[in-house]
Image (tube, rainbow, N blue to C red):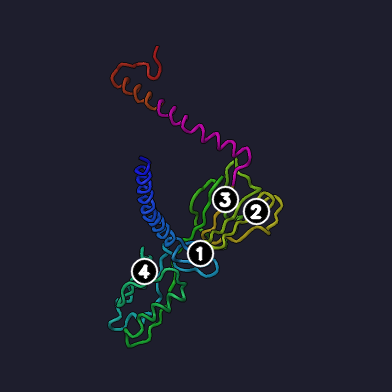
Amino acid sequence: MTTEPANSWRWLLGLLLLALPLFGGCGTFEDKRIRELLHEKGFGTRADGDATQENYLGGQDTVQFLISPDALAQPGAERLAELVAGQPVNIDGTIFVPFVGPVYVLGLTEAELGALVSSHLRGKFQFELDLQARIVTTLKYYYAIGEVGFKGRVPLETDMTLWDALMVVRWTNLANLGRVMLIRPDAEHPLVIDVNVRDMFTGGGTAPNIRMRERDTIYIPPTALGMLARILQRLLEPVALAVQTVIGAAQVQISYDILQGRNQAGFFRF
């Protein structure tokens, strides 16, 4: 009588042991896919560099090439004029070069870009081609979050410092200017700098007035009372939304009654 249930339990246990590798394999496969998407260095973008030191071609930049008029006047070189007009970088990181086709240029500096395109066009003509690349419009950003007046991506200006950046994004009345954080994100070595901006503004000491770089993040936390105010705001948001919905529905009903002539007194009934 007792051997039959024992055999059943052994049979179920064997099935579970056989099924465990299947479940483990699914988790390992998903983890492997996630690890393949992660990066080990930098910000994670294909275009990387320090634009404040030497500008590079980003995804939202426009590039043009300077070519001598004598080269454009040569027979068979008329299509080179297409390079003179400004050309934005395509979504795949390429630009179109006549006689060559798409060329991957994302992340290149002006000198590197000019040398690359010149090497592609070398041998296409019987004359020496003098070509220089120029990034005519560039859009590099930093980010602002927390108790700031302007959240999100902010265009990076020439020679911009933390002081300048804060004057652009501004701050709310709940901001804690004594603990402004400048975050320089990186997959391997992220850097977080805690700056007392209040002392910098009132005392004039510019030691912490750090030069901004693209993709820097400015985070302004709230004060202790500001944090309490934000918590109360989050708690009351559903109530405010419900009241607003009820009031809106009532206003619609009153407007409908007025149009139908059933409420001549407007918003008030007597």
* 264 or 185, nearer to the observer: 185
2 or 1: tag closer to the N-terminus:
1
Q: In which quarter of the image is residue 213?
A: bottom right
Residue on which the image places disc 1? 42
4 or 2: tag closer to the N-terminus:
4
Which range is magenta? Answer: 221-246
Residue 39 x %, y %: 47, 63
Q: Which of marks 1 and 3 is in front?
A: 1
Q: Does the magenta portion include 158?
A: no
Badge 4 element: strand
Cβ–Cβ under 8 Å for marks 2 and 1? no
Q: Which residue is drawn at 44% across and 60% down?
A: 35
Residue on which the image places disc 2? 195
**Mark 1 and mark 3: span between their CA atoms?**
20 Å
User: Type of residue at label 1?
Assistant: Gly
1 or 3: tag closer to the N-terminus:
1
* 28 or 147, nearer to the observer: 28
User: Type of residue at label 3?
Assistant: Tyr
In this image, 225 relative to 251: left or right?
right
User: Type of residue at label 4?
Assistant: Thr
Mark 1: give few (<14), some (14-19) or many (20+) Cα within 10 Å: some
Labelled disc at residue 94: 4
In this image, 112 relative to 183: left or right?
left
Q: Quadrant of the N terminus?
A: top left
**Mark 4 and mark 2: span between their CA atoms?**
40 Å
Q: Which residue is drawn at 46% across and 73% down?
A: 110
**Mark 2 and mark 3: span between their CA atoms?**
10 Å
Q: Does the magenta portion include 241?
A: yes
* 210 or 29, nearer to the observer: 29
Q: Quadrant of the C terminus?
A: top left
